[in-house]
């Protein structure tokens, strides 16, 4: 195989770019050190070749070889950049330098060899990017110390620019966090966390170039999950918050009514059954109920698991009527220092032996027409018409637990708990006649055979 054919194969394998020029042999050349900005266009000047050309000089062949030779082409004695719209000179991809070699041939014989080193000058053409592993949802204990670093975010810039971090204050939860050192990405807890109020938070984090004119930036939404810790005490239900902004419950006072006939029965309380729940919603620790005081030597016993109170024996007829006041406690089974107290009031009522009776079964009244929206119904003796009930269970005949209502209900009249009848004057017509029925009933009725009476007006 001829030497010329071997040389052509070698040049093809190395993607050799050759050009024939006129020169005084392969003399006067030198290594080439140059620079070019990244993203430069096709044909950007790189360097001139210093091989001399004298009058009457011979022709020589110059060839570009080496790892990055395809980024250059020869135009006479000038080296230019070979880029395109689909092949952009990118420092972040290629690295900081392009390396090639310039070889000079005379009659296909290599005469001289020069190195080409071109620095790719950086341009700010990249935005910062957050590292995915630093912006995944975080979990923070609700008892994390305020002013402590709770997590760190990190962004990188392919151009090597400095990055500063900020929290977008338009975020609803931005008040919980702050950044003391903008270049560090360390996020500090600014406000106490409470799982019972918020189980997760969201903030918008910005990363921005701090040493460039463009100030390229990027944002991301961070989710912070709050971990529940056993830091709350149990509370009795229903919970009445101390104030709308303070998630602390005021324990209710439970009350029940009994008579001397009651015994060996579970008591029913108002405003509801004695129940409690753990203050830590995410933990819901098991609870234990106990009577601390007022059980009257075992007259009242409490189910430690359900909170039910049972009356074990009746109140002695020889004992004066009295109320019982109990103090009950609920605590966590595994931590009895976490507890809460409530008061239980048990009222002993007299046995209801007699039904209430109206003092009359028929009353007649009238209303004076007026522009007033409401008027009190009067008797024909020009007195206030008042319904009255007598109860023999009370020495003075007045039962304070009686309440009145109209049956059926009326849109034109209503009766007060004192038995006074009120009419909506603005809805009545002159000479109208209405027949009403009023019923009386015992409030907190304990005896099932209590009867009610009615009358017509």
Image (cartoon, rainbow, N blue to C red):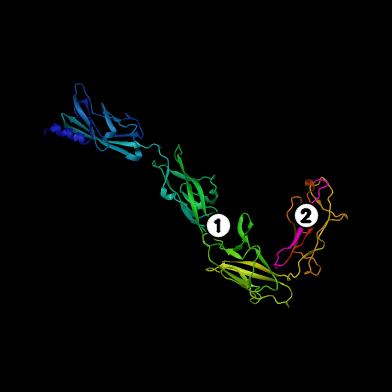
Q: Find numbered disc 1 in the image and state the secondary structure of the residue it sits on.
A: loop
Write down the residue under mark 1: 196
The disc label shown at residue 1, or none? none
Q: Is residue 209 visible?
A: no
Where on the picture, by quarter, is residue 18?
top left
Above-or-below relation of 193 to 313 = above
Q: Is residue 218 visible?
A: yes
Q: Nearer the viewer, residue 214 or 338?
A: 338
Write down the residue under mark 2: 436
Question: Which residue shows up at 32% across the image and 37% down it?
Answer: 119
Q: What stretch is highlighted in magenta?
A: 429-449
Neighbours of disc 1 within 10 Å: few (<14), some (14-19), many (20+):
some
Pinpoint residue 278: horizontal percent, then vertical percent. Answer: 56, 63
Above-or-below relation of 435 to 345 = above
Q: Locate the N terminus and report the quarter of the image it occupies.
A: top left
Above-or-below relation of 217 to 8 = below
Q: Locate the C terminus and report the quarter of the image it occupies.
A: bottom right
Pinpoint residue 76: horizontal percent, then vertical percent. Answer: 26, 26
Q: Find numbered disc 2 in the image and state the secondary structure of the residue it sits on.
A: loop
Question: Which residue shows up at 39% across the image and 36% down it?
Answer: 123
Horizontal side of 155 relative to 363 (left or right) equals left
Q: Is-magenta flag for residue 448?
A: yes
Given the current orientation, which residue lies at the most extreme left position? 1
Given the current orientation, which residue lies at the most extreme bottom position? 318
């Amino acid at each position: 195989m001829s030497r010329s054919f071997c040389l052509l194969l070698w040049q093809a394998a190395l993607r050799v770019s050759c050009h024939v020029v006129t020169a005084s042999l392969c003399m006067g050349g030198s290594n080439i050190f140059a620079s070019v900005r990244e993203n430069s266009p096709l044909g950007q000047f790189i360097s001139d070749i210093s091989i001399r050309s004298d009058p009457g000089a011979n022709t020589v062949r110059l060839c570009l070889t080496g790892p990055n030779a395809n980024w250059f082409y020869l135009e006479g004695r000038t080296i230019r950049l070979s880029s395109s719209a689909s092949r952009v000179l990118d420092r972040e991809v290629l690295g900081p330098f392009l390396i090639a070699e310039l070889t000079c041939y005379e009659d296909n014989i290599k005469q001289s060899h020069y190195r080409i080193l071109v620095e790719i000058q950086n341009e700010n053409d990249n935005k910062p990017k957050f590292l995915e592993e630093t912006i995944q949802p975080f979990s923070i204990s609700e008892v994390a110390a305020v002013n402590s670093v709770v997590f760190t975010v990190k962004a990188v810039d392919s151009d090597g620019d400095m990055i500063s971090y900020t929290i977008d204050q338009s975020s609803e939860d931005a008040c919980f966090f702050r950044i003391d050192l903008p270049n560090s990405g360390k996020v500090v807890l600014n406000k106490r966390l409470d799982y019972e109020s918020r189980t997760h938070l969201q903030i918008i984090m910005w990363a921005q170039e701090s040493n460039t004119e463009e100030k390229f930036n990027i944002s991301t939404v961070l989710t912070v999950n709050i971990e529940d810790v056993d830091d709350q005490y149990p509370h009795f239900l229903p919970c009445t918050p101390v104030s709308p902004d303070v998630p602390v419950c005021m324990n209710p006072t439970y009350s029940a009514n009994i008579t001397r006939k009651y015994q060996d029965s579970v008591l029913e309380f108002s405003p509801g059954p004695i129940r409690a729940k753990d203050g830590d919603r995410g933990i819901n620790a098991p609870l234990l109920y106990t009577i601390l005081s007022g059980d009257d030597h075992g007259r009242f016993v409490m189910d430690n698991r359900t909170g039910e109170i049972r009356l074990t024996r009746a109140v002695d007829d020889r004992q004066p009527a009295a109320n019982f006041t109990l103090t009950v406690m609920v605590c966590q089974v595994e931590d009895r220092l976490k507890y809460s107290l409530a008061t239980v009031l048990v009222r002993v009522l007299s046995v209801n032996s007699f039904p209430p009776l109206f003092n009359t079964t028929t009353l007649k009244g009238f209303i004076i027409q007026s522009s007033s929206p409401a008027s009190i119904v009067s008797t024909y003796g020009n007195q206030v018409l008042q319904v009255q009930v007598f109860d023999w269970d009370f020495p003075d005949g007045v039962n304070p637990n009686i309440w009145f209502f109209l049956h059926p209900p009326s849109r034109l009249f209503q009766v007060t708990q004192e038995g006074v009848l009120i009419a909506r004057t603005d809805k009545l017509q002159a000479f109208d006649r209405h027949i009403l029925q009023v019923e009386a009933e015992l409030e907190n009725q304990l005896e099932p055979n209590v009867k009610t009476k009615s009358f017509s007006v």
